[in-house]
Amino acid sequence: MTKQHVLVIGAGVSGLTTALALLQAGHKVTIRCKEPGGQFAHTSISAYAMWVPVKMDGDPRIERWTGESFEAFKKLAGDTATGVTMKPIYQLKTKKEAPWFAGQNAGNLCGFRHAEASELPAGYADAYVLSSAPVIDPLVYMPWLYWQVHDAGGLFGQTEFKNLDGIHPQYSVIVNCAGLGARELAKDADVFPDRVQVVTIKSSNIDRVVIDDEGPNARACIVPHNGYVKLGGVFDGPHESYEGADLSTVQGIIDRCNAIAPELKADQSQVISVIRALRPERKGWLPRVEVDRTICADGRPVIHNYGHDGMGYLLSHGIAAEIASYAANL
C-alpha cells in the first residue's frame, strides 16, 4: 500500500470520520477547515444525527455504507464518552405495508418490527419500529471525534479554500469534504443548500425517536439526546444563510411533535434554542464519492465526499472506509 500525505478539506462529521479512517490506514493527514479552532461545522453540530435504513437505486453503495456505519456506531455505543446510544426509532406511516428493508440485512440489524396499535398516535395506520438503532449526540460526538483524529496524528489548521489549484505539492491526495463549499471547489452546480429549522428543548420523558415525514403532522421529528431533545422541523428551501431563526414557526413545531408522541408534553417554556441549518443537498439526492483526476490543474487526485443531504452521519463510516481504500490504491 502506498502511504500518502492527504489533505482533507472540511472538518464536519464526514471530514473528521474520513480523516480518522485514513490515519488508521497509516496515511499522514492534514485537516483544513474554515471554522476557527474550538468550533465545529454548524451543519454537523445542528444535525438530528440518527441512523435509519437507506438505499437508493442510483447508487447501490449507499445501502452498504449505511450498514457499515451501523456496525461502527453500535460498537461506539459501548463507550459513553462517544455520545452514541442505541434507541428505538418510530417512523410513522399512514398505511400499513412492508418497508423495503423488511427481512433484509438493514432490517435485521436494527430489529425491525411493525408497531402495535396501542403504540400509534391518532391519524396513523402503522409505524416502522427500529427496536435498537444508533442515535448520536453531536455535542458529545463531534468533540470526541476531533480528539480521536488529533490523538491519531491528524494535523489541524484553519483555511478557507476557494479552489483546488495552488495547493502545496506536499499533499499527494486531496479529499474534498467541504459540504456546501464543494459547489465552488468542485465547480458542481448541482450542489445547493436546503434550510431546516430545529427547536431544542430541555430533556423530557421521551427516550425514543419519532418521525412523521408523510402523515398529518409532517414534517415532525423528535430526537432525544443527553439532557436535551431536538424537535423539527421546517424546511424552507434553498437559502444561502442559516442566520435569523424564524420564531413564528416554533409553536407549530412543538404542536406537531406533541401530536406524534403524546408523552413529550413540550411547551415553549422548555425551549433552549431555535436554530437554522443548511443541509448540503445535491441534485438527484445522491452524494458524490469518487476519485477525480481532472479538477486539479496539476492532475493530483481529488477524492470527493460531499452532497450527503441529511445522511452525513449515517453514511459517514462506510464512506470513510471506502475513501481509505481509494487512497491506498492511488
Image: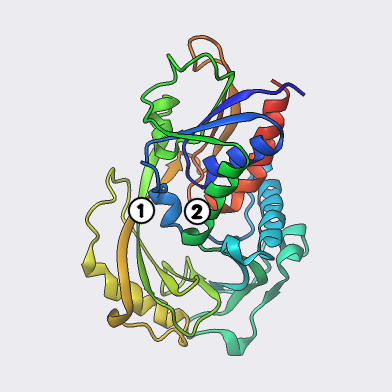
Q: Position of residue 317 (x, y in %)?
A: 64, 47
Q: Earlier in the sequence, mark 2 or mark 1?
A: 2
What residue is drawn where x is 78% and y is 64%?
Answer: 103
Element carrying mark 1? strand
Q: Does 189 sit above or below residue 220?
A: above
Q: Residues within 10 Å of mark 1 (few under 14, many from 20)?
A: many
Q: Position of residue 70 (x, y in %)?
A: 68, 57
Give the side of residue 25 with respect to residue 39, left or right. right
Quick check: can you spot residue 232? yes
* Residue 220, quarter of the rendered image: bottom left
* Residue 72, quarter of the rendered image: bottom right
What residue is drawn where x is 55% and y is 48%?
Answer: 147
Residue under pointer 2: 143
Q: Does 36 sit above or below residue 69?
A: above
Query: Mark 1: which amino acid?
Result: Ala
What residue is drawn where x is 50% and y is 53%?
Answer: 143
Query: Mark 2: which amino acid?
Result: Pro
* Residue sitting farthest toward the bottom: 118
Q: Which mark is residue 277?
A: 1
Q: Position of residue 177 (x, y in %)?
A: 50, 36
